[in-house]
Image (tube, coloured by chain):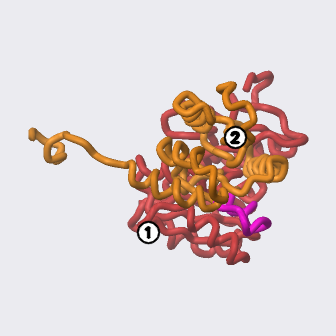
Chain colours: A orange, B red
Amino acid sequence: MSDTPDSIAPRALVAGHGDFAIGVVSAVDQITGRGGVLLPLSNRGLGADEIVRVLREAVISNDTQVIFTDLPAGSWTIAARRVQRERPDLVVVTGANLPALLDFVFQTDCSASVAARHSADKGRGALAVLGGGTGSGGAD
Amino acid sequence: MPIEICRIDDRLIHGQVVVGWGQPLDVKFIVLVDDEVATSDWEQELYRLGVSPGMDVYFETVASAADRFAALAADGRVGLLLTKDIETMERLVARVPAIRTINLGGLHARAGRRPKLRYVFLSPEEEQGLRALAARGITITAQDVPATRPIPIDDLLAEPRTP
Protein backbone atom coordinates (compact mmCIF):
# COMPACT_ATOMS: atom_id res chain seq x y z
CA MET A 1 0.00 0.00 0.00
CA SER A 2 1.10 3.54 -0.61
CA ASP A 3 2.11 5.59 2.40
CA THR A 4 0.38 8.72 1.20
CA PRO A 5 -2.05 9.86 2.29
CA ASP A 6 -1.53 7.93 5.49
CA SER A 7 -4.82 8.81 7.17
CA ILE A 8 -6.97 6.81 4.77
CA ALA A 9 -9.26 4.30 6.45
CA PRO A 10 -11.11 1.49 4.68
CA ARG A 11 -14.42 2.73 3.36
CA ALA A 12 -15.38 -0.37 1.42
CA LEU A 13 -14.56 -4.05 1.25
CA VAL A 14 -13.46 -5.72 -1.97
CA ALA A 15 -14.25 -9.43 -1.81
CA GLY A 16 -13.00 -11.68 -4.56
CA HIS A 17 -11.86 -15.11 -5.63
CA GLY A 18 -8.20 -16.04 -5.31
CA ASP A 19 -6.02 -12.93 -5.34
CA PHE A 20 -8.47 -10.81 -7.32
CA ALA A 21 -9.16 -8.37 -4.50
CA ILE A 22 -5.54 -8.05 -3.43
CA GLY A 23 -4.54 -7.49 -7.05
CA VAL A 24 -7.16 -4.94 -7.94
CA VAL A 25 -6.68 -2.99 -4.70
CA SER A 26 -2.95 -2.99 -5.39
CA ALA A 27 -3.71 -1.52 -8.80
CA VAL A 28 -5.91 1.16 -7.24
CA ASP A 29 -3.10 2.03 -4.87
CA GLN A 30 -0.50 2.16 -7.64
CA ILE A 31 -2.66 4.49 -9.69
CA THR A 32 -4.07 6.72 -6.98
CA GLY A 33 -2.25 6.13 -3.71
CA ARG A 34 -5.67 5.54 -2.20
CA GLY A 35 -5.66 1.77 -1.95
CA GLY A 36 -6.22 2.10 1.76
CA VAL A 37 -9.82 3.11 1.06
CA LEU A 38 -10.45 -0.50 0.10
CA LEU A 39 -9.95 -3.60 2.20
CA PRO A 40 -9.32 -6.73 0.09
CA LEU A 41 -10.70 -10.13 1.11
CA SER A 42 -10.10 -13.56 -0.39
CA ASN A 43 -12.33 -16.62 -0.04
CA ARG A 44 -9.48 -19.07 -0.61
CA GLY A 45 -9.86 -22.07 1.67
CA LEU A 46 -13.08 -20.85 3.26
CA GLY A 47 -16.38 -22.67 3.44
CA ALA A 48 -19.70 -20.91 3.04
CA ASP A 49 -20.20 -20.26 6.76
CA GLU A 50 -16.65 -19.00 7.15
CA ILE A 51 -17.05 -16.61 4.24
CA VAL A 52 -20.09 -15.08 5.91
CA ARG A 53 -18.26 -14.86 9.25
CA VAL A 54 -15.20 -13.17 7.73
CA LEU A 55 -17.37 -10.71 5.84
CA ARG A 56 -19.57 -9.90 8.82
CA GLU A 57 -16.53 -9.26 11.02
CA ALA A 58 -14.92 -7.07 8.38
CA VAL A 59 -18.09 -5.02 8.02
CA ILE A 60 -18.40 -4.52 11.75
CA SER A 61 -14.77 -3.87 12.55
CA ASN A 62 -14.39 -1.33 9.75
CA ASP A 63 -17.89 0.12 10.06
CA THR A 64 -18.24 -0.42 6.33
CA GLN A 65 -21.31 0.44 4.28
CA VAL A 66 -20.15 -0.91 0.93
CA ILE A 67 -19.08 -4.33 -0.30
CA PHE A 68 -17.70 -4.83 -3.79
CA THR A 69 -17.71 -8.45 -5.04
CA ASP A 70 -16.16 -9.83 -8.19
CA LEU A 71 -18.69 -12.37 -9.43
CA PRO A 72 -22.46 -11.91 -9.29
CA ALA A 73 -22.89 -15.69 -9.04
CA GLY A 74 -20.09 -16.17 -6.55
CA SER A 75 -19.90 -17.18 -2.92
CA TRP A 76 -18.89 -13.67 -1.85
CA THR A 77 -22.06 -12.24 -3.33
CA ILE A 78 -24.15 -14.91 -1.63
CA ALA A 79 -22.39 -14.10 1.65
CA ALA A 80 -22.81 -10.36 1.12
CA ARG A 81 -26.55 -10.82 0.64
CA ARG A 82 -26.69 -12.73 3.91
CA VAL A 83 -24.88 -9.96 5.78
CA GLN A 84 -27.03 -7.40 4.00
CA ARG A 85 -30.09 -9.10 5.43
CA GLU A 86 -28.77 -8.24 8.91
CA ARG A 87 -27.60 -4.78 7.81
CA PRO A 88 -30.08 -3.44 5.23
CA ASP A 89 -28.06 -0.21 4.95
CA LEU A 90 -25.22 -2.12 3.29
CA VAL A 91 -24.72 -1.60 -0.44
CA VAL A 92 -23.43 -4.57 -2.43
CA VAL A 93 -21.89 -3.94 -5.84
CA THR A 94 -21.25 -7.07 -7.91
CA GLY A 95 -18.96 -7.47 -10.89
CA ALA A 96 -16.52 -4.89 -9.54
CA ASN A 97 -13.70 -3.83 -11.83
CA LEU A 98 -10.76 -1.45 -11.69
CA PRO A 99 -12.52 1.57 -13.24
CA ALA A 100 -15.34 1.23 -10.72
CA LEU A 101 -12.98 1.07 -7.79
CA LEU A 102 -10.89 3.96 -9.06
CA ASP A 103 -14.03 6.06 -9.24
CA PHE A 104 -15.09 5.01 -5.75
CA VAL A 105 -11.89 6.05 -4.00
CA PHE A 106 -12.20 9.56 -5.37
CA GLN A 107 -15.83 10.01 -4.32
CA THR A 108 -14.97 11.53 -0.96
CA ASP A 109 -17.58 14.26 -0.70
CA CYS A 110 -20.64 12.02 -0.66
CA SER A 111 -21.81 9.05 1.34
CA ALA A 112 -20.21 5.69 0.69
CA SER A 113 -23.48 4.31 -0.64
CA VAL A 114 -23.84 7.17 -3.14
CA ALA A 115 -20.21 6.73 -4.14
CA ALA A 116 -20.81 3.03 -4.67
CA ARG A 117 -23.73 3.61 -7.02
CA HIS A 118 -21.72 6.18 -8.96
CA SER A 119 -18.80 3.80 -9.23
CA ALA A 120 -21.04 1.02 -10.51
CA ASP A 121 -22.11 3.26 -13.37
CA LYS A 122 -18.47 4.04 -14.07
CA GLY A 123 -17.46 0.39 -14.07
CA ARG A 124 -20.33 -0.60 -16.31
CA GLY A 125 -19.46 2.10 -18.79
CA ALA A 126 -15.81 1.13 -18.92
CA LEU A 127 -16.45 -2.14 -20.69
CA ALA A 128 -15.77 -1.78 -24.38
CA VAL A 129 -14.69 -3.87 -27.32
CA LEU A 130 -12.10 -2.24 -29.55
CA GLY A 131 -11.01 -3.39 -32.98
CA GLY A 132 -11.01 -6.99 -34.13
CA GLY A 133 -12.91 -6.50 -37.37
CA THR A 134 -16.43 -7.88 -37.50
CA GLY A 135 -15.84 -10.31 -34.63
CA SER A 136 -17.38 -13.13 -36.63
CA GLY A 137 -14.63 -15.53 -35.63
CA GLY A 138 -13.64 -16.25 -39.22
CA ALA A 139 -11.37 -14.43 -41.60
CA ASP A 140 -12.31 -10.76 -41.34
CA MET B 1 -28.71 -36.64 -21.03
CA PRO B 2 -28.44 -37.78 -17.39
CA ILE B 3 -27.59 -35.56 -14.50
CA GLU B 4 -23.93 -35.09 -15.34
CA ILE B 5 -22.53 -34.49 -11.88
CA CYS B 6 -23.66 -35.22 -8.33
CA ARG B 7 -21.48 -32.89 -6.28
CA ILE B 8 -20.86 -32.31 -2.59
CA ASP B 9 -19.92 -28.68 -2.06
CA ASP B 10 -20.47 -26.66 1.11
CA ARG B 11 -20.77 -23.45 -0.92
CA LEU B 12 -23.60 -24.96 -3.00
CA ILE B 13 -24.23 -22.58 -5.91
CA HIS B 14 -21.14 -20.43 -6.51
CA GLY B 15 -18.58 -19.53 -9.13
CA GLN B 16 -16.95 -22.94 -9.55
CA VAL B 17 -20.33 -24.56 -10.05
CA VAL B 18 -21.99 -22.01 -12.29
CA VAL B 19 -18.96 -20.94 -14.29
CA GLY B 20 -16.23 -23.54 -13.69
CA TRP B 21 -18.42 -26.56 -14.44
CA GLY B 22 -21.51 -24.90 -15.82
CA GLN B 23 -19.96 -23.33 -18.87
CA PRO B 24 -17.81 -26.18 -20.24
CA LEU B 25 -20.53 -28.76 -19.62
CA ASP B 26 -23.28 -26.42 -20.79
CA VAL B 27 -25.26 -27.10 -17.62
CA LYS B 28 -28.86 -26.00 -18.05
CA PHE B 29 -30.27 -26.89 -14.67
CA ILE B 30 -29.10 -27.36 -11.10
CA VAL B 31 -30.84 -29.56 -8.56
CA LEU B 32 -30.03 -28.16 -5.12
CA VAL B 33 -30.87 -30.84 -2.55
CA ASP B 34 -31.13 -29.42 0.94
CA ASP B 35 -34.01 -29.81 3.36
CA GLU B 36 -33.49 -26.35 4.85
CA VAL B 37 -33.13 -24.44 1.60
CA ALA B 38 -36.08 -26.29 0.08
CA THR B 39 -38.35 -24.83 2.75
CA SER B 40 -37.04 -21.26 2.73
CA ASP B 41 -38.19 -18.78 0.09
CA TRP B 42 -35.45 -16.37 1.12
CA GLU B 43 -32.68 -18.94 0.72
CA GLN B 44 -34.06 -19.96 -2.65
CA GLU B 45 -34.15 -16.36 -3.87
CA LEU B 46 -30.57 -15.95 -2.72
CA TYR B 47 -29.30 -18.95 -4.66
CA ARG B 48 -31.47 -18.21 -7.68
CA LEU B 49 -29.65 -14.89 -8.03
CA GLY B 50 -26.42 -16.83 -8.39
CA VAL B 51 -27.20 -18.67 -11.59
CA SER B 52 -26.76 -17.61 -15.15
CA PRO B 53 -29.70 -16.57 -17.31
CA GLY B 54 -31.14 -19.63 -18.98
CA MET B 55 -30.12 -21.94 -16.14
CA ASP B 56 -32.92 -23.41 -14.04
CA VAL B 57 -32.61 -24.23 -10.36
CA TYR B 58 -34.79 -26.82 -8.66
CA PHE B 59 -34.85 -26.78 -4.87
CA GLU B 60 -35.57 -30.20 -3.44
CA THR B 61 -35.63 -31.96 -0.11
CA VAL B 62 -33.93 -35.33 -0.01
CA ALA B 63 -37.34 -36.96 -0.24
CA SER B 64 -38.60 -34.87 -3.16
CA ALA B 65 -35.29 -35.21 -5.00
CA ALA B 66 -35.53 -38.98 -4.68
CA ASP B 67 -39.08 -38.90 -5.99
CA ARG B 68 -38.14 -36.69 -8.95
CA PHE B 69 -34.70 -38.08 -9.72
CA ALA B 70 -35.74 -40.34 -12.56
CA ALA B 71 -37.63 -37.53 -14.28
CA LEU B 72 -34.75 -35.11 -13.78
CA ALA B 73 -32.25 -37.63 -15.08
CA ALA B 74 -34.39 -38.06 -18.18
CA ASP B 75 -34.41 -34.33 -18.86
CA GLY B 76 -32.98 -33.62 -22.29
CA ARG B 77 -30.67 -30.97 -20.87
CA VAL B 78 -27.43 -31.28 -18.90
CA GLY B 79 -28.02 -31.15 -15.15
CA LEU B 80 -25.90 -30.90 -12.02
CA LEU B 81 -27.02 -32.02 -8.56
CA LEU B 82 -25.66 -30.43 -5.38
CA THR B 83 -25.62 -31.21 -1.68
CA LYS B 84 -23.75 -29.18 0.89
CA ASP B 85 -22.51 -32.15 2.92
CA ILE B 86 -21.78 -35.85 2.82
CA GLU B 87 -24.63 -36.75 5.14
CA THR B 88 -27.23 -35.31 2.76
CA MET B 89 -25.68 -37.16 -0.16
CA GLU B 90 -25.70 -40.39 1.87
CA ARG B 91 -29.42 -40.00 2.55
CA LEU B 92 -30.09 -39.28 -1.11
CA VAL B 93 -28.04 -42.20 -2.38
CA ALA B 94 -29.87 -44.52 0.02
CA ARG B 95 -33.06 -43.65 -1.87
CA VAL B 96 -31.58 -43.26 -5.34
CA PRO B 97 -29.40 -46.25 -6.29
CA ALA B 98 -29.04 -44.76 -9.77
CA ILE B 99 -26.40 -42.36 -8.43
CA ARG B 100 -23.16 -44.14 -9.26
CA THR B 101 -20.60 -41.33 -9.23
CA ILE B 102 -20.02 -38.49 -6.79
CA ASN B 103 -17.85 -35.42 -7.18
CA LEU B 104 -16.38 -34.10 -3.95
CA GLY B 105 -16.05 -30.45 -4.86
CA GLY B 106 -15.48 -28.55 -1.65
CA LEU B 107 -15.64 -29.13 2.09
CA HIS B 108 -13.62 -26.44 3.77
CA ALA B 109 -11.84 -26.11 7.09
CA ARG B 110 -13.78 -26.04 10.32
CA ALA B 111 -13.43 -27.43 13.82
CA GLY B 112 -13.03 -31.18 13.90
CA ARG B 113 -11.96 -31.52 10.28
CA ARG B 114 -8.51 -32.48 9.06
CA PRO B 115 -6.98 -31.27 5.78
CA LYS B 116 -7.00 -33.68 2.84
CA LEU B 117 -6.70 -31.29 -0.09
CA ARG B 118 -6.69 -27.51 -0.22
CA TYR B 119 -10.44 -27.66 -0.80
CA VAL B 120 -11.30 -30.82 1.15
CA PHE B 121 -11.22 -31.06 4.94
CA LEU B 122 -12.89 -34.04 6.61
CA SER B 123 -13.93 -35.09 10.09
CA PRO B 124 -13.57 -38.75 11.06
CA GLU B 125 -17.34 -39.11 10.71
CA GLU B 126 -17.23 -37.64 7.21
CA GLU B 127 -14.41 -39.99 6.23
CA GLN B 128 -16.55 -42.84 7.44
CA GLY B 129 -19.46 -41.50 5.40
CA LEU B 130 -17.36 -41.45 2.25
CA ARG B 131 -16.17 -44.98 2.91
CA ALA B 132 -19.77 -46.08 3.33
CA LEU B 133 -20.68 -44.52 -0.01
CA ALA B 134 -17.69 -46.17 -1.68
CA ALA B 135 -18.72 -49.50 -0.15
CA ARG B 136 -21.94 -49.20 -2.15
CA GLY B 137 -19.82 -49.32 -5.28
CA ILE B 138 -20.11 -45.62 -5.96
CA THR B 139 -17.15 -43.96 -7.66
CA ILE B 140 -16.08 -40.92 -5.66
CA THR B 141 -13.45 -38.46 -6.76
CA ALA B 142 -12.38 -35.10 -5.40
CA GLN B 143 -12.15 -32.39 -8.04
CA ASP B 144 -12.94 -28.73 -7.52
CA VAL B 145 -12.89 -27.60 -11.16
CA PRO B 146 -12.67 -29.47 -14.48
CA ALA B 147 -9.08 -28.39 -15.13
CA THR B 148 -7.72 -30.14 -12.05
CA ARG B 149 -6.93 -33.85 -11.77
CA PRO B 150 -9.65 -35.94 -10.11
CA ILE B 151 -8.39 -37.57 -6.91
CA PRO B 152 -9.81 -41.04 -6.24
CA ILE B 153 -11.35 -41.57 -2.83
CA ASP B 154 -8.76 -44.19 -1.88
CA ASP B 155 -5.98 -41.70 -2.48
CA LEU B 156 -7.85 -38.97 -0.66
CA LEU B 157 -8.34 -41.05 2.46
CA ALA B 158 -4.87 -42.55 2.46
CA GLU B 159 -2.62 -41.33 5.28
CA PRO B 160 -0.79 -39.06 5.42
CA ARG B 161 -1.71 -36.43 2.84
CA THR B 162 -0.51 -32.85 2.55
CA PRO B 163 -3.21 -30.34 1.66
Residue A39: image tag: 2
Letter of the chain that mark 1 sits on in the rendering: B
Mark 1 and 2 residues: CB-CB less than 8 Å, in contact? no
Q: Nearer the viewer, mark 1 or mark 2?
A: 2
Q: Kindly tell me whether residue B76 is visible in this rendering.
A: yes
* Neighbourhood count class around disc 1 (C-alpha, 10 Å): few under 14, some 14–19, many 20 upward: some
Tags 1 and 2 both on a single chain: no
Crowdedness near tag 2: few (<14), some (14–19) or many (≥20) residues, C-alpha within 10 Å: many
The question of residue A86 being in magenta is answered with yes
In the rendered view, would you say B150 is above or below A114? above
Q: Is residue B6 left or right of residue B119?
A: left
| Image quadrant occupied by the N terminus of chain A | top right
Q: Position of residue A58 (x, y in %)?
A: 79, 47
Residue A20: percent from left, percent from top: 57, 37
Residue located 49% across and 54% down the image: B4
Amino acid at dot 1? Asp
Give the x, y percent position of residue B122: 80, 40
Chain part drawn in magenta: A80-91
Mark 2: secondary structure: strand
Residue type (three-letter) at the residue carrying disc 2: Leu
Q: Indicate the quadrant where residue B97 lies.
A: bottom right
Does residue B119 show up magenta in the picture?
no
